[in-house]
Every structure is written in structure tokens, then in C-alpha cells.
């Protein structure tokens, strides 16, 4: 009897253990499946949302502002950029893109939901096409600041200016993956007025306009290209040049060495908001 009891007891326990284990495994499998489905579903929703946002941004570029729209009115609209009955500001960045400065600038602009205008150098577009693409996809206006930035080469003749413009547009199109893109907006390196090459610059303005290409200078600046590297000094300088202007085009630079430019950007944005400025880019101007 004693022997029987000893033999029966362990048999019962093994069965129980096996049963409990099977139930446990099944339950774990069910929970695991539910969690997996939940994660997949969440990721799909996230992807769908991202696609919807991308689609909306694409519409901003492609549907509302076609190249035909730009061609018909960009020269006139840009000429009137400083006429405004409300306070507006255009943040513009020259000489980029660069890894160390353009990327933090894009991050700050994204955080603040601000669309800016970038006057890029063809040579740097070739170096960092993925940054150009990101800026474009995030709704910034990609414009043209020549290919070489070498005054002697660019201003040799009006035709050379157009040549540098075309060369840069070509690499921008390649970088953003849109072979119909044409910014139709040029910023003269060193500005469109004055200097040793003034005569050729004025001829180039006419040649660009004839080809439905506008040009834009600025009416405020951080002086980040003129040697200011101290953040407070730079902020004071730019606020002084903004003054009480109603329509402001601020010149900044996103060359790899211009770290103070992005360091002051959040403060500059807040100061402009406090003064009641609306942030716009060239797409808003053309609309
Ligand atoms: Zn420049």
C-alpha cells in the first residue's frame, strides 16, 4: 500500500505540471500575438500618418505653386517683397548646405514649425544632396546662390551668371529627385548692387528677369559673414537692422563654420514672435 501511494502521487503531479505548462504556453502565445498585432498596427498607423504629412507637403510644393505659376509672377512678386501691410519675416540662409550647421537649423525650424528660404551653392548641393532633399521635403524654399561663389568667375559676364544659375538648378533637381523643379530665384553672392562687378551684375539682373528668374537681396542681417561670433553681439546686431521694418528679409549663413548662427536662432525666433512677426517663405509670397 505504501509503495502504491508513493508511485501514484508523483504521476498525478507530472500530469498537473504538464497541463499547467501547456495552458501557460498557450496563454503566453495569445498575449504575444496580441502585443505583436498591436505593435504592427501602431507602426502602420504611424507610417500612414507620416505618408499623409509627406503628401500634404508635396501638395504645398507641387499643386499650389507650379513652375508655370512661378514663371508668370515670381519677378514681380519678389520685387514687391518689402511691401506689406502686416509684419512678416523671411529667414534666409546662404552658402549651404553643410552638415554641422544646416542640420541643427532644420531641427530648430521644425520644432518651431517655421519654413525658411535656403540659397544654396551648387558645389555644396553636390556634397550633401540628402540635406537638400530634407529641407525641400520639410517645406523650405530651395533657391540658388551660384555654383562656385567665386566673384571673378561668376561676374565675368551676365551670361556666366545665368550659367552658374543653371548649373546649380541642375544639381538641386537631382538632389530633390524632381526633374521639373526650377527655383527661379537667385541671390547674387555679395549682393546684387555695388562692388567691382556692379555693371555686369545689373546686366545679369536684366538677363535673369528675361528668363523669368527673380533675384533677392536682404534688408536685415546677423553679420555672421562679417566676423561677429559672439551670440549676444549677433542678436543685438540683427535686432538693430530689423528695427521697425514691416517686411523683413534676414540674411544668415549656414556654412559649416557658422555655429553662432544656429545657436542664436531660437532666441531670434522668440524675439521676432514677441514683436508680432509672421514667418513666411517664398511659397507664401507666391501664393
Ligand atoms: Zn554667399
Image (spheres, grey):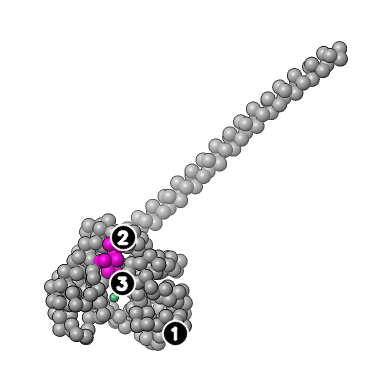
* Circle 1 residue: 233
Rendered residue at 35%/74% (across/down): 253
Residue 262: percent from left, percent from top = 42, 73
Would you call the spot at circle 3 few (<14 residues within 10 Å), some (14-19), or many (20 or more)? many
Left or right of 117, for residue 74: left
Q: Which quadrant does ligand 1 occupy?
A: bottom left
* Circle 2 residue: 129
Left or right of 100, for residue 153: left
Residue 122 falls within the magenta-colored stretch: yes
Rendered residue at 45%/74% (across/down): 263
Depth check, front residue: 86 or 35:
35
Instruction: Pick whichever of labels 1 and 2 is earlier in the sequence.
Output: 2
Vertical placement of residue 181 versus 14, above or below: below
Q: Quadrant of residue 256?
A: bottom left
Whether residue 206 is visible: no
Q: Quadrant of residue 251?
A: bottom left
Vertical placement of residue 11 versus 111, above or below: above
Instruction: Pick whichever of labels 3 and 2 is earlier in the sequence.
Output: 3
Rendered residue at 72%/23% (across/down): 14
Q: CA distance from mark 1 to mark 2?
A: 33 Å
The quadrant the C terminus occupies is bottom left
Q: Which residues are magenta?
A: 120-127
Vertical placement of residue 53 versus 193, above or below: above
Q: Quadrant of residue 142?
A: bottom left
Residue 112 falls within the magenta-colored stretch: no
The reply to whether the C-beta atoms of the residues labelled 3 and 2 are less than 8 Å apart is no
Residue 286: percent from left, percent from top = 27, 70
Amino acid at each position: 500500500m505504501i509503495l502504491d501511494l508513493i508511485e501514484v502521487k508523483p504521476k498525478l503531479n507530472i500530469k498537473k505540471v504538464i497541463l499547467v505548462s501547456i495552458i501557460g504556453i498557450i496563454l503566453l502565445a495569445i498575449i504575444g500575438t496580441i502585443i505583436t498585432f498591436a505593435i504592427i498596427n501602431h507602426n502602420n498607423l504611424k507610417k500612414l500618418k507620416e505618408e499623409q504629412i509627406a503628401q500634404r507637403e508635396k501638395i504645398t510644393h507641387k499643386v499650389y505653386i507650379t513652375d508655370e505659376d512661378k514663371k508668370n509672377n515670381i519677378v514681380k512678386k519678389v520685387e514687391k517683397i518689402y511691401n506689406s501691410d502686416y509684419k512678416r519675416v523671411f529667414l534666409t540662409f546662404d552658402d549651404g548646405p553643410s552638415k554641422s550647421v544646416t542640420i541643427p537649423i532644420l531641427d530648430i525650424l521644425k520644432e518651431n514649425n517655421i519654413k525658411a528660404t535656403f540659397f544654396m551653392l551648387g558645389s555644396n548641393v553636390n556634397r550633401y544632396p540628402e540635406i537638400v532633399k530634407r529641407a525641400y521635403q520639410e517645406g523650405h524654399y530651395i533657391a540658388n546662390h551660384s555654383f562656385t561663389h567665386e566673384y571673378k568667375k561668376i561676374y565675368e559676364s551676365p551670361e556666366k551668371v545665368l550659367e552658374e544659375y543653371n548649373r546649380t538648378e541642375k544639381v538641386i533637381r537631382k538632389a530633390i529627385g524632381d526633374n521639373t523643379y526650377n527655383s527661379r530665384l537667385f541671390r547674387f553672392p555679395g549682393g546684387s548692387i555695388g562692388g567691382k562687378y556692379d555693371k555686369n551684375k545689373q546686366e545679369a539682373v536684366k538677363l535673369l528677369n528675361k528668363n523669368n528668374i527673380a533675384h533677392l537681396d536682404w534688408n536685415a542681417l546677423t553679420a555672421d559673414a562679417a566676423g561677429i561670433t559672439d551670440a549676444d553681439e549677433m542678436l543685438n546686431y540683427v535686432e538693430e537692422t530689423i528695427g521697425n521694418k514691416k517686411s523683413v528679409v534676414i540674411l544668415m549663413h549656414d556654412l559649416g563654420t557658422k555655429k553662432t548662427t544656429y545657436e542664436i536662432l531660437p532666441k531670434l525666433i522668440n524675439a521676432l514672435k514677441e514683436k508680432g512677426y509672421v514667418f513666411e517663405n517664398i511659397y507664401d509670397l507666391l501664393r
